Image: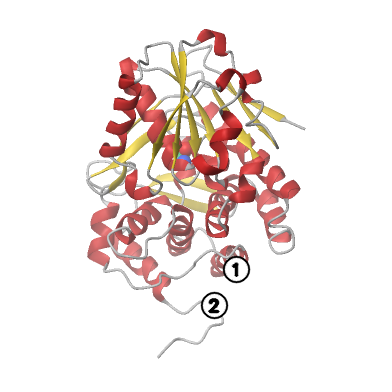
Amino acid sequence: MTVTIEIAVPASHESANYPIWIGADLLPSLEQRLPLERYSNVTILTDTNVAPRWLASLQHGKLASAKACVIPAGEEHKNLNALQTVWEHLHNTGCDRRSLLLNLGGGVIGDLGGFAASTYMRGIDFVQLPTTLLSQVDASVGGKVGCNFNEVKNLLGAFNQPQAVCIDTNTLKTLPPRELRSGWAEVIKHGLIRDTSYLRLLAENSKEESQSSAWLARVIERSCRLKAEVVTLDEREGGLRKILNFGHTVGHAIESLSHQGDAPYLHGEAVALGMVAEAEISRLQGYISEDDVVELEQLLTDYQLPVRLKASLPWESLQSKMLTDKKNVGGSLRWTLLQKVGQAVFDVEVEESLVKSAVTRLSQASHGEEIPR
Ligand code: GLY
């Protein structure tokens, strides 16, 4: 069964609505869903991890002649070099304004491919084919495209909506377990910022079912509905959409800093740590209770996500990375916090001393754990 969610983005233009298709076995039949007669040619952008597993399922029938552009896998390749490779490929293979780009992969491919498509010849159509849980529930939906620059996450980018998002849930069967776990952080974020009944459902199903296909499909649909609703209300992040950044101010800083060492965090792992820190800021602001933060830590732990840093990070490094956050205004940090569990607020200004104190939680012993000596 295929579920279709319509996403409406009035800020772009009236006809900019597009479908999100969710189901098993959707990649092999994609050629029948897309209006390929409209395009002069099709390019598939993918990476060295995804190509051996999923490229062939796409490249047949009407898509047999689609050319593949395969770039190295990993967040460290979400940069201008990779972008140049994609632009060169589009140019060298004769792509024109009526070319279509299919982005087959995780968040890096979707963001980078979306940005390449948005800038090549002032913009060609693209379709997102996310293959990781993280990109299926979050990154592929809503039209944020871009790349990292000067060691800052997504410093360059644009809002540009795809023609469609096609989520083949079979791709999760070949996803490394660590990547799958990373995706749960964004799912948990959705419950925390807007939907307590979703959060309860996630807590009830954390252990037994977290790998079953039916459960994963249910979660993807619910998260995509929530995200589509937020993006429909505020495509360009003038206000409400900022709630989706909960956990990301500290999370992005931790993620970027970890890439300077030899044991980088995956995006979802860094967001899990960021959510603990930002829940703690919410507590110190007087919004939520210690029990709420402990419950969040328990939920993240149940989904095998980190709630404490592997190694401590100097406050100065963290602070200077956080100052590069796109939500900041005039050099001062603006926070998305939890006013209560299930309800986020945005643009909150917080005393620096409070933030500094909150992030120490990430280096303390977890609830019920002995403090290491
Ligand atoms: N990932 C946050 C957003 O799409 O707004």
Query: Which quadrant of the figure has residue 360?
Result: bottom left
Q: Is residue 135 above or below residue 83?
A: below
Q: Is residue 5 above or below residue 221?
A: above
Mark 1 is on which residue type? Gln
Alpha carbons under labels 1 and 2: distance apart: 9 Å
SS under mark 2? loop
Pick whichever, 106 or 4, lies toward us.
106
Screen quadrant of the N terminus: top right
| x then y, percent, for residue 303 | 61, 62
| x then y, percent, for residue 85 | 30, 33
Return the mark for residue 367.
2
Decide which of tag 1 and tag 2 comes sooner along the chain: 1
Return the mark for residue 298.
1
SS under mark 1? helix
Pick whichever, 132 or 91, lies toward us.
91
- CB under 8 Å between discs 1 and 2: yes
| Residue occupying the point 52% across, 8% down | 38
| x then y, percent, for residue 258 | 33, 61
| Residue occupying the point 57% across, 34% down | 56
Mark 2 is on which residue type? His
Q: Is residue 163 above or below residue 27?
A: above
Instruction: Please tell me how crowded label 1 is: few (under 14), some (14-19), or many (20+) other residues with Cα within 10 Å.
Output: some
CB at mark 1 closer than 8 A to ligand 1?
A: no
Pick whichever, 198 or 36, lies toward us.
36
Residue 172 visible in the displayed image: yes
